[in-house]
Image (cartoon, rainbow, N blue to C red):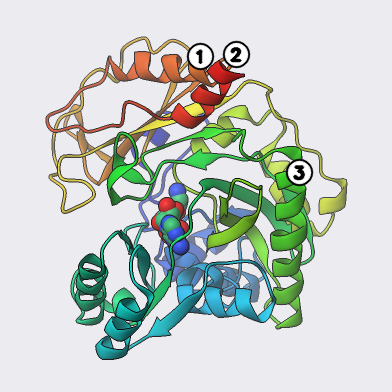
Amino acid sequence: MAPGNPGIDAETRCRTIDAQADDVERLLTFALENDVDFTVVGPEAPLSKGVVDAFRAAGKRIFGPTRAAAQLESSKAFAKDFLERHSIPTAAYAVFEALEPALEYIRTRGAPIVVKADGLAAGKGVVVATTVAEAEAAARDMLSGGSMGAAGSRVVIEEFLDGEEASFIVVANGTQYVPLASSQDHKRIFDGDLGPNTGGMGAYSPAPVVTPEVHARICRDVIEPTLAGMSAEGRPFGGFLYAGVMIDRQGGIKVLEFNTRMGDPETQPILFRMESDLLELLEAAVDGHLDQAMVRWSPEPALGVVMAAHGYPGPVRKGDVIRGLDADLGGAKVFHAGTSRRGDDIVTSGGRVLCVVGKGRDVAAAQRSAYAAIREITWDGMQFRTDIGYRAIARESAG
Ligand code: AMP
Ligand code: GLY
């Protein structure tokens, strides 16, 4: 794992190496010198820097999309234009690099309306504006090189979609694919889906909103035309393809975004339920026999709650000492994100610090398990939502 963190260090079968995840040259040198047989790319930054292209050129097996294919995530304008070219359902939109036309578009369309930075912004480049003034302020901030830097020099402005979101991730290699279990993320910082967007404050799997019919529709109307379109355009997609979709009351779907990796925090509850071998699945993709791959899931739902640092999703304070990680957490598991070691302590070192995952007979039981573990953990300024999974739990108690 490069660079890993103290949580990964504590796993007996993992080793961390001192290399940044986006230092392509150093990673390739390491892989060559240490005879690394197979590499899996986690985050988007190295993908957009061409880590897969570089490894392949050197004859190393690697799982992930090429730089050209990773544009589905690294440029929202590319993704939207692609969706339109291939008649894949998505919100109506326009792309702007100049402020005046963007403002005019906002005024003409009215609110609610959504303003998105084109480039990579760690889940924080989207403003769902409820007023015209808020949308104008977001466009002004992004296009003037404000909080998003270069990622905001181009913006996508799109129609507001109402409905319930789900995350749908498949393992793909060009035209073949295997869907992973569905999940649902919670993007807003506060309970009840209030406050600004974050990278994700908690998730659970499976997402009941993804009924068998919705599942089939996402495969047929989104995943298959996307893979076919990418191949036809000469940038076949291999890797994790993540479609964030909005599902309306009639079960109609529209694509909100693509990621070219697994989502965070969706990955934690999804993989907590996986009973078959992940590595075998990814090797089958790279070696071209995904059609023979088998994936098995625990029928029990899993639910993960993100614990974030003081200030998140704005500028965060680092260095707060985390206590309680040694407590007996029952069947729950703590996944580290923004943590680091300082002497004998583990301290906060990023926005999203931990994700605590529980499993149970139903989503309510998985939620109880996760929050019981969270009660043991504390640091100055920690924040977490207390309602992760509320939609699924409402369905369970209604049904
Ligand atoms: P994105 O990174 O494009 O998925 O946007 C982040 C989050 O903003 C999504 O997960 C949604 O919660 C919200 N969002 C994005 N686009 C729209 C839209 N067109 N209508 C409503 N909400 C949206
Ligand atoms: N949770 C959504 C993402 O990883 O972008």
Judged left or right of residue 30, residue 113 is left
Looking at numbered disc 2 in the image, what kind of residue is underneath it?
Answer: Arg
Name the image quarter holding residue 64: bottom right
Judged left or right of residue 87, residue 161 is left
Q: Marks 2/3: CA distance? A: 24 Å
Looking at numbered disc 3 in the image, what kind of residue is underneath it?
Answer: Glu
**Residue that mark 3 sits on:** 213
**Residue that mark 2 sits on:** 361
Neighbour tally class for label 2: few under 14, some 14-19, many 20 plus, Cα within 10 Å: few
User: The C terminus appears in which quarter of the rendering?
Assistant: top right
First in sequence, mark 1 or 3: give its number.
3
Q: Nearer the viewer, residue 50 or 198?
A: 198
Residue 352 position within the rendered picture, expressed as x and y whole percent measured from the top left: 30, 42
Look at the numbered discs 2 and 3 and tell me whether their residues touch, using CB distance below 8 Å. no
Residue 365: give its label.
1
Q: Is residue 342 above or below residue 134?
A: above
Residue 36 position within the rendered picture, expressed as x and y whole percent measured from the top left: 59, 54
First in sequence, mark 2 or 3: give its number.
3
